[in-house]
């Protein structure tokens, strides 16, 4: 009798509809992955294996396989929304219990940890106070939201062109008298300004002020001679400028300035390079995440500092992962060991900040599959109905 075949078909079609319904329900779930029901036929054979015309006894759902294909990536306005473009999972820690997800909807908690909606903490490679990434075993990422400390200038470099056509200036130098020099640079914080004054053919004096105070008390802090080719003669060392600071900071800060790139050509005074390695204290203004997972903090003083790097984890067999709900999966013996690394390394995908990976559910295909599954269910029900009619005919035999 074919009741068993029809019943197994009803059960298989019902489970297929469950899978399709779950896919449709998660069509808008960030990071969700579609599943599909995989079927297998059933045959009964004797112990001896005799008979080559065995009649099938139905169908079974052999597996419900998740499809870890790439979902579409959509842009958002949050820098801590992260999308994985390629292979890999975010590694989450919840009280030491690890899980893995493709949902990159993250935010900062009150303690500075990067967390998801379930309270799991994103893991990665932390950075030290200087912004150097400490690659090793991933740990929970915690961002420092405090101010960055100031750094005194240790080195500076200034490259200018002095106008060879300028005439030597008579009289004395005064920073408030624009006719007593032919060019000046601009500083920052402790405002150090260099003034360039031609005193003779191919001879230039450099005066300096700090916050308006003449550091040379009317005298030049440096003198330079140029050759016929417009370049500095000899190999002058750095110009040391003694900047007055508060008594608690030592009273004076000596700043070496590299002026070896100065030229004297027949063109207007211009500054082509003005760099120094110091900066004032700064407040945190924003975060950004690079494609390699490096989390950069930007401060109001123009500085950026790495605060860690997001880790991604890959598995030999992602379909072997156990779904936990909440867009998370757990490692199993079927998935293989987790292999952690930096985004973009090896086969791991890149991180896209300010974006989210949408579900990979193809809603149109799921609706077509739903119609097909419904018809299969109806057809199996019809086989049971037909078999019932056959049995009724046998029962009614006289």
Image: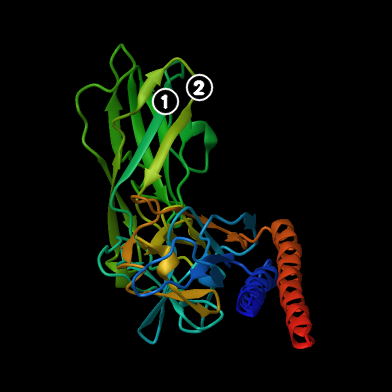
Image position, residue 161 (x, y; %):
42, 25
Q: Is residue 157 above or below residue 71?
A: above
Q: Is residue 309 above or below residue 154?
A: below
Residue 224 in the figure: left or right of residue 73? left
Q: Which mark is residue 268?
A: 2
Element under disc 2:
loop
Q: Residue at x 39, y 54 (%)?
A: 348
**Could you give the CA–CA distance between mark 2 and mark 1, rounded to whole angstroms?**
7 Å
Residue 135 in the figure: left or right of residue 160? left
Task: Please say if the residues under marks 2 and 1 sit with CB atoms less than 8 Å apart.
Answer: yes
Q: Give the camera-side residue of 242 and 20.
A: 20
Element under disc 1:
strand
Q: Give the camera-side residue of 179 and 32.
A: 32
Image position, residue 91 (x, y; %):
41, 71
Residue 237 in the figure: left or right of residue 287? left
View extreme (front): residue: 398
Mark 2 or mark 1: whose residue is earlier in sequence = 1
Please name the residue that numbered disc 1 is placed on: 161
Q: Quadrant of the N terminus?
A: bottom right
Q: Residue at x 75, y 88 (%)?
A: 395
Question: Would you say residue 85 is visible in this rendering?
Answer: yes
Query: Quadrant of the rendered structure where residue 146 is?
Result: bottom left
Q: Residues within 10 Å of mark 1 (few under 14, many from 20)?
A: many
Q: Quadrant of the C terminus?
A: bottom right
Q: Residue at x 51, y 66 (%)?
A: 40
Q: Colour scheme of this structure image?
A: rainbow
Q: Give the camera-side residue of 152 and 309.
A: 309
Q: Residue at x 20, y 28 (%)?
A: 235
């Amino acid at each position: 009798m074919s009741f068993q075949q029809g019943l197994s078909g009803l059960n298989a079609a019902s489970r297929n509809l469950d899978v399709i319904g779950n896919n449709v329900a998660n069509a808008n779930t960030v990071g969700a992955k579609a599943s599909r029901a995989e079927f297998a036929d059933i045959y009964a054979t004797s112990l001896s294996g005799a008979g080559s015309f065995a009649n099938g006894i139905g169908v079974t759902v052999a597996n419900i396989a998740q499809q870890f294909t790439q979902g579409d990536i959509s842009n958002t306005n949050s820098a801590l929304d992260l999308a994985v473009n390629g292979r890999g999972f975010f590694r989450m820690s919840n009280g030491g219990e690890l899980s893995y997800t493709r949902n990159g909807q993250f935010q900062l908690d009150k303690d500075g940890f990067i967390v998801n909606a379930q309270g799991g903490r994103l893991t990665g490679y932390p950075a030290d106070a200087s912004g150097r990434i400490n690659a090793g075993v991933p740990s929970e990422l915690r961002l420092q939201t405090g101010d960055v400390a100031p750094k005194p200038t240790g080195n500076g470099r200034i490259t200018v062109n002095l106008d060879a056509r300028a005439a030597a200036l008579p009289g004395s130098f005064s920073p408030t008298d624009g006719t007593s020099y032919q060019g000046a640079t601009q500083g920052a914080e402790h405002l150090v300004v260099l003034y360039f004054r031609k005193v003779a053919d191919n001879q230039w004096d450099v005066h300096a002020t700090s916050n308006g105070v003449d550091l040379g008390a009317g005298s030049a802090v440096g003198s330079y001679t140029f050759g016929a080719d417009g370049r500095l003669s000899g190999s002058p060392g750095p110009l040391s400028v003694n900047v007055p600071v508060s008594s608690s900071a030592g009273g004076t800060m000596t700043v070496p300035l590299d002026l070896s790139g100065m030229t004297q050509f027949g063109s207007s005074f211009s500054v082509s390079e003005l760099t120094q390695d110091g900066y004032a204290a700064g407040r945190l203004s924003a975060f950004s995440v690079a494609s390699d997972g490096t989390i950069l903090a930007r401060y109001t003083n123009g500085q950026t500092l790495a605060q860690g790097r997001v880790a991604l984890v890959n598995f030999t067999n992602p379909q072997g992962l156990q779904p936990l709900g909440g867009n998370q999966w757990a490692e199993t013996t079927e998935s293989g060991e987790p292999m952690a690394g930096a985004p973009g390394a090896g086969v791991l995908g890149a991180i896209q900040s300010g974006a989210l990976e949408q579900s990979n559910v193809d809603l149109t295909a799921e609706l077509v599959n739903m119609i097909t599954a419904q018809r299969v269910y109806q057809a199996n029900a019809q086989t049971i109905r037909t078999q019932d009619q056959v049995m009724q005919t046998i029962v009614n035999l006289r």
